Amino acid sequence: MSAARLHGDDTPVPILAKGKTDTGRAWVYVRDDRPFGGADPPAVLFKASRDRSGDHPQEHLTRFAGILQADAYAGYNRLLAPDRQHGPITEALC
């Protein structure tokens, strides 16, 4: 999570629940700066949740500052505040 750039996305996944299947979310954060001359190895982080609350990316990206490439999901909006404690996040919409 110390990368200068991250790609973030979430996708629906089935989660077994008592007597049924619910829809949860798999949150994925990827870094790969090799195309930009970066020396760090590529990496991916997976997180899971039972819902798509904007609280999840808030928690996952608490200490991240840099460029976040993501869709226009409103759950990322609080991360874009210019006075954010851990530094600014610049959105790069895909």
Image: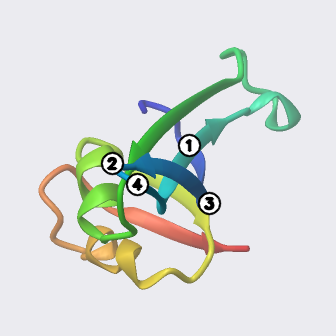
Which mark is drawn over residue 11?
3
Vertical placement of 46 versus 13: above or below? above
Q: Nearer the viewer, residue 32 or 72?
A: 72
Is tag 4's residue or tag 3's residue first in the polypeptide sequence? 3
> Where in the figure is residue 49, as x and y percent of width and height?
37, 51
* x 52%, y 35%: residue: 46
Q: Mark 4 and mark 3: span between their CA atoms?
A: 23 Å
Label 4: state its secondary structure: loop
Q: Mark 1 and mark 2: span between their CA atoms?
A: 9 Å
Residue behind mark 1: 29
Q: Nearer the viewer, residue 46 or 38?
A: 46
Whether residues under marks 3 and 2 lie with C-beta atoms below 8 angstroms apart, the answer is: no
Vertical placement of 39 versus 16: above or below? above
63 sits left or right of 57 in the view: left
**Which amino acid lies under the numbered mark 2 shown in the image of this protein?**
Leu
Q: Mark 1 and mark 4: span between their CA atoms?
A: 31 Å
Whether residues under marks 1 and 3 lie with C-beta atoms below 8 angstroms apart, the answer is: no
Residue behind mark 2: 61
* Front label number (1 vs 3): 3
Label 2: state its secondary structure: loop
Quadrant (top left/top right/bottom left/bottom right) for the C terminus? bottom right
* Front label number (1 vs 4): 4
Label 3: state its secondary structure: strand
Residue behind mark 4: 19
Q: Mark 1 and mark 3: span between their CA atoms?
A: 12 Å
Q: Nearer the viewer, residue 42 or 54?
A: 54
Is tag 2's residue or tag 4's residue first in the polypeptide sequence? 4
Whether residues under marks 1 and 2 lie with C-beta atoms below 8 angstroms apart, the answer is: yes
Is tag 1's residue or tag 3's residue first in the polypeptide sequence? 3
**Which amino acid lies under the numbered mark 1 shown in the image of this protein?**
Tyr
Quadrant (top left/top right/bottom left/bottom right) for the N terminus? top left
Is tag 1's residue or tag 4's residue first in the polypeptide sequence? 4
